[in-house]
Image (cartoon, helix red, strand yellow):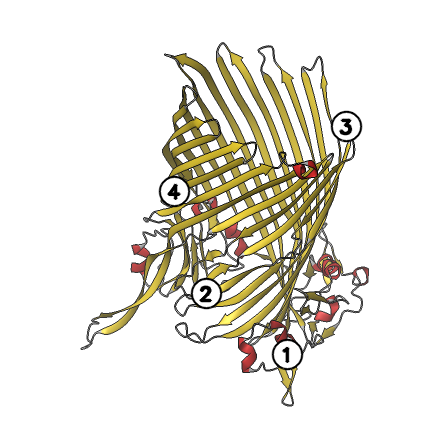
Amino acid sequence: YGERFFDNSLGVQLFGNLERRVRSSEQYNVGIDELDLTDPDYQISDFQLKYTPEIRKRAGGKLLLDYRTLDNGIIKFNTEYNRTERRLSTIDRNYPITAGDVTFNFRGQDINTEIMNIALHGENYISDWQINWNMSYSESGSDTPYDYFMHLNEPSASANGEVVSGMYFVPENLRHTTDYEKLIPYALNNFDVAYFNRVESRISSNLDFEKTIFLDAKKAYNVFGFSGEVKFGGKYRSKYHRRKTTLRQGLYYNGIGNGFYNDVKLSDGSIVPKDFAAYGYEDLKIESNLILLTNFLDSSTRDLFGQYLLNPLIDADRVRDWYNLNINGFNKITNKYEYPVDNSDAGTNYNLTESISSGYIMNTLNIGTLATFIAGVRFEHDNNSYNAFYTNEEVTEFSVFSDTSITHNETIVLPNFHLILKPTDFMNLRFAAYRGIERPNFNYRLPTYIYGRNRVGGSGPYVKLGNPDLTNADAWNFEVNSQFFGNTIGLFSISAFYKKIENQVNQLWFVPIQNKETADSLGIVYPSDVPPFSTAYSLSYPYNTKNATRVWGFEFEHQLNFRYLPGLLSNIVLSYNFSIIKTESYTPVYNAVDYFVQLPGSPFPTKRTRVEISEAKTRTANSPELFGNVSLGYDIGGFSGRISYFYQSEYYNVYSGNSYANNIQKEFGRLDLSLKQQINDMLSVGLNVNNLTDAEEGAYLENKFVERRNDIASYRYGTTADLWLRVTL
């Protein structure tokens, strides 16, 4: 809705939107067992299927007010609110080939996100000066009131020499197959012996808010026949982030009475028997004092990717009823909860404020119509405070965390230069050199220290350490851009760029540390009250690399309409763009090195092994070398249609520290369709169809030493369609 009032002095615009979308994804993962890391031979260790159905609802509104002031300026007020509700389930199971039990997992989540923005913006005039000013506040909150993770097991068991549950023996020839559907029949699917192992329940909330204020002033001038504009201003921005999470765990593998109780404790403190019938569990299935998987089964199955049978499916509503029945389970004899609070997650909570103060001055000089030269400098100052929680002891469910805080201050000068040439009426040339800044993820700077015995995907002691001394990365950028335009060729541009990044943040991802010398060589300083390590451990730690990262390449873009063609052909529009990007970065790697020490009383040197950490030149992670998009459209009357294709080449997701297990994202292409019809001045309808060809994404595992790649994952989001209606009042 839009309208103007009071002789067009006041403008009012209202926007509202409602959306409901059904989303789902399918995924498989393949575990690879490398028999010898330097030998090409391997075997499949595990095959996992995962299905994630989701319903997402969105609602929002926006109000825009603008008022024309007496100085021919304008003041705008903008407020916006959006809410997103996601209800999703994740169902997965595996097919272990080499060892281990069959596992079934279910995770149900309700995720609610609210975003509010308020802004007041002005464009006013004082004498010959134009003043632009802005004050804004934004707040976003995300809470997860329901996050329930069930783990169930089907043990590998035999009776009288015959396998009765788990997996049959998989022949050697199938341990190298890429026809993964051939592995599925080797599962016995004896759900009558599959039992409830344990459960995790998390309630979490995240809060972010940002306050911004800025003021710009500019004035045009004309000196000695040259025109130009001088501009200066300042800006202040403050961001606050907070995370709170509470983890509760229930252990069901001990059986009825030892983790599962028959009473609940109500909010008023009273203890009453559980009402099993009210939640549909009056006939709870139990075997050998264990709760069985069959209590939670859905009657249907699903073929993932059209060829992999996911059986069983776990009923999301049955699981939610189980959660409501047992979340406050209580043993009045031992005075224990069924789901006691587990403090091991408390070390991931934080609150922090990052503030940036900046000021700049710049000048634009026009040399007739031939050239424009822009030069300026910007000053930025970071003033940040970080609060986190840590314990100097091994993290357990009983850990007590203390709060700790640090501050970080940093100032940088950012010059920039631009030269724009217009040698003809159909061509522009632009040259640019400027210094930019890249700030690290705030999680890296948190004064975090977590020491544990086991982690997901690993074994043995580990340390996760933040680095409050991380500095911002900065980069010099150089760009050359040329544009050609005309009624026949449309707009064609080609750009070349080069970037050199200093102080890039790298991440040691659980690198083995075997002695104090290795940690000292990295400049790592542990909290003063941390006891010394007497054993090897794995370390996760971010740091600034001393080696520069380089990025260079070309970008092409062409926008063209065919109005010069006769008849209906004149309604065709075409646009395409693509980028070719080369990168050179440095990745942390580690090697085991033998050395000898002379021990007292020993006539011979004793061999020791230490880990040496260095950096190897690689392509930058998460950076495809080629990506592009082409769109073909047709516009006639109130109808508009577009069909587009997006392509991106493969790239490295993660480099392993020893190059035996690099993760590579597969190349990907997708075809989309967009249709719109304007019915009248008030009504328009549209249809968006994404991923018409049902393209899949996926990943490889690369062993660089033997030049081998294995398919380890595929993700399918399917073809999705949105039908929309827009009403304009």
Residues tagged 3 and 1 counted as in contact (Cβ below 8 A) = no
Amino acid type assigned to the residue bearing label 3 in the image: Leu
Q: CA distance from mark 1 to mark 2?
A: 28 Å
What residue do we see at 30% from left, 55% from top? 520
- Residue 472 showing in the rendered view: no
Checking the image for residue 20, the label placed there is none
User: What whole-number distance in Å separates the C-alpha atoms at marks 2 and 4?
Assistant: 29 Å
Comparing labels 3 and 1, the label whose residue is closer to the camera: 3
Residue 697 location in percent, x, y?
58, 58
Mark 1: amino acid = Tyr
Residue on which the image places disc 1: 186
- For mark 4, give the secondary structure: strand
Most foreground residue, 34 or 340: 34
**Picture coordinates of residue 5 (x, y %)?**
72, 16
User: Which quadrant holds residue 154?
Assistant: bottom right
Mark 3–mark 1 Cα distance, whole angstroms, equals: 62 Å
Q: Alpha-carbon neighbours of circle 4 within 10 Å: few (<14), some, or many (≥20)?
A: some
- Name above or below for residue 387 compared with residue 452: above
Quarter occupied by residue 727: top right
Is residue 177 at all visible to an observer of this figure?
A: yes
**Label 1, label 4: how many angstroms apart (C-alpha)?**
54 Å
Residue labelled with disc 4:
498
Q: Are marks 2 and 4 in contact (CB under 8 Å)?
A: no
Give the structural element (helix, strand or loop) at label 3.
Answer: loop
Tell me: 308 left or right of 598: right
**What amino acid type should be assigned to the residue bearing mark 4?**
Tyr
